[in-house]
Amino acid sequence: MQYLGIYLVFVNVIAFLAYGVDKYKAKKNLWRVPEKTLIGFAAVGGFAGAFLGMQCFRHKTKHMKFVIGIPVISVIWIGLLIYLGMKII
């Protein structure tokens, strides 16, 4: 369980940063982080970082696959963590 916790912290930080980088690149009209990658970070455990990145950077908040998809992925992960008996907060 300890390794899972460390992994989740790491992947959430990376997800949060990816949303920030993509927002920066969007403003500068540079090469972007693919949407599959952003959603993928949430799918592999970075659900909180993805959600916080969306809110903090106001990024992808009008795209329905993010507005609906990230919360759905979050519920699935939270359910899995509860099932595994891991403290969430």
Image (cartoon, rainbow, N blue to C red):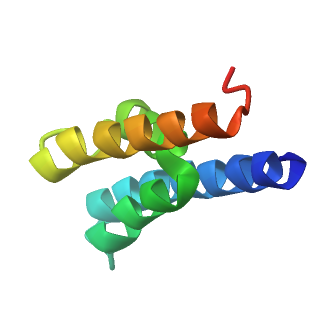
Q: Is residue 11 above or below residue 31?
A: above
Image point (61%, 58%), residue name? 14
Name, please, the residue furthest toward the top: 89
- Counting labels gives 0
Q: Where 65 sits versus 31, above or below?
A: above
Please provide percent x and percent y for residue 36. 31, 71
Residue 62 percent coordinates (x, y)? 12, 41
| Image location (x, y in percent) of residue 35 | 28, 67
Point out the image quarter for the C terminus: top right
Look at 11% across and 46% down and name the residue there.
64
- Asked whether 21 or 74 is in front, the reply is 74
Residue 63 visible in the snapshot: no
**Residue 40 appears left or right of 8:** left
Q: Residue furthest bottom?
A: 31
Extreme residue toward the front, this view: 83
* Res. 68 visible in picture: yes
Q: Quadrant of residue 40?
A: bottom left
Residue nearer the viewer, 41 or 20 = 41
Task: Indicate the position of residue 13 as horizontal and vertical percent values.
Answer: 65, 50
| 40 or 19: nearer the viewer | 40
Residue 61 vertical position relative to residue 37 in the rendered view, above or below: above
Query: Residue 33 versus residue 4: which sits nearer the camera?
Result: 4
Residue 3 as seen in the image, left or right of residue 67: right
In the picture, measured across the screen, residue 45 lies left or right of residue 62, that is: right
Q: Residue at x 20, y 39 (%)?
A: 67
Q: Residue at x 83, y 47 (%)?
A: 1
